[in-house]
Amino acid sequence: MNEIALSRTPQGTPAATPTVTRRRVLAGAAGLVGVPLATGVYAGAIEPQGLVVTRYAPAPRNWPVDRKLSITVIADLHAGGPDMQLGHVRRIVDTASALQSDLVLLLGDFTAWYRFETTPVPDELWAAELARLKAPLGTWAILGNHDWWHHLEGVRRALAGVQIPVMENDAVLLGAEGRKFWLAGIGDQLAIPLGHGRYRGVDDLPLTLSRIKTDDPVLLMVHEPDIFPRVPNSVALTLAGHTHGGQIRLPLIWPKFVPSRYGARFAYGHIVERERHLIVSGGLGTSIIPARLGVPPEIVHIELGA
């Protein structure tokens, strides 16, 4: 387990002081930046209701070129609130199902939380929608920080009720003979708030990797991308959410408000460092402020061995 502090830093520079949470940065952005009314209406009422499929075809060094695998990634659903009611959840699931991927991965933060009163989506309803996702190699989940902070037992019960396994510092070998790979998932890195912007994680990367017993390629599910510098080269591809791609991407300003100790370094998209591959989803819902600008809700579709 790891104790983590988040702070605002320039791009690519690790932080040392415990200051930043998404709540502070988004609230600060909303308070300090004057947004024209039309842009504000678009960010609050239009873009959060959009939906795109973002496609990647990475070629990790540790993934065999002849081992084809398609993956659908759903991150940061945040069901509830003004922008993620049941109809939108249903449209997301319909779109994801149409991709007909071999594997579906759910990267945490299943319910919404705001400081103001909102209309919740009952756990059994959003979970029933996710249960419609079918894939030959299954649907697998990890938990995110908001699951831990606001609704842990409800989220656990909902996923268990629809038989979607939650991976926490565990790994499973999937695939047919000659096409096998390991799917690993770690516990959340910000699970337990300690106060003053500090958190203790329930993640255990060494334990997770110790469960991998063959030299078959490895996919790793994490909620927060900040663990990526510690991920070894033996992992072919790391998949993350959490950042919402910045959620509100105002020119020149947004990188400072990404909820990561690394600023914009792991904010969004396909990142390659020292031949190690990371894909960070922009997610689907919103957090703290029910608005998106420049980062429409997205489902990620990945083709490996293409």
Image (spheres, rainbow, N blue to C red):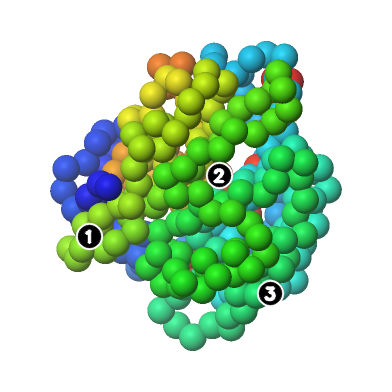
Query: What residue is disc 2 on?
Result: 281
Query: What residue is disc 1 on?
Result: 197
Q: Amino acid at mark 3?
A: Leu
Q: State left or right for residue 71 relative to residue 99.
A: left
User: From what the image shows, is residue 229 above or below residue 72?
Assistant: above
Name the one closer to the observer, 93 or 9: 93
Q: Amino acid at mark 1?
A: Gly
The answer to whether residue 153 of the structure is visible from this angle is yes
Q: Give the class, few, some or many, for how many residues have Cα within 10 Å of label 2's Cα (few <14, many ≥20).
A: many
Badge 1 or badge 3: first in the primary sequence = 3
SS state under label 2? loop
Residue 196 image point, x, y percent: 17, 63
Query: What residue is disc 3 on?
Result: 125
Q: State left or right for residue 31 relative to residue 172.
A: left
User: From what the image shows, is residue 185 above or below residue 90?
Assistant: above
- Between the C-alphas of marks 1 and 2, the distance is 24 Å
Q: Amino acid at mark 2?
A: Ser
Residue 218 image point, x, y percent: 53, 27
- Residue 79, by quadrant, is bottom right
User: From what the image shows, is residue 235 above or below residue 138?
Assistant: above
- Between the C-alphas of marks 1 and 3, the distance is 33 Å
SS state under label 1? loop
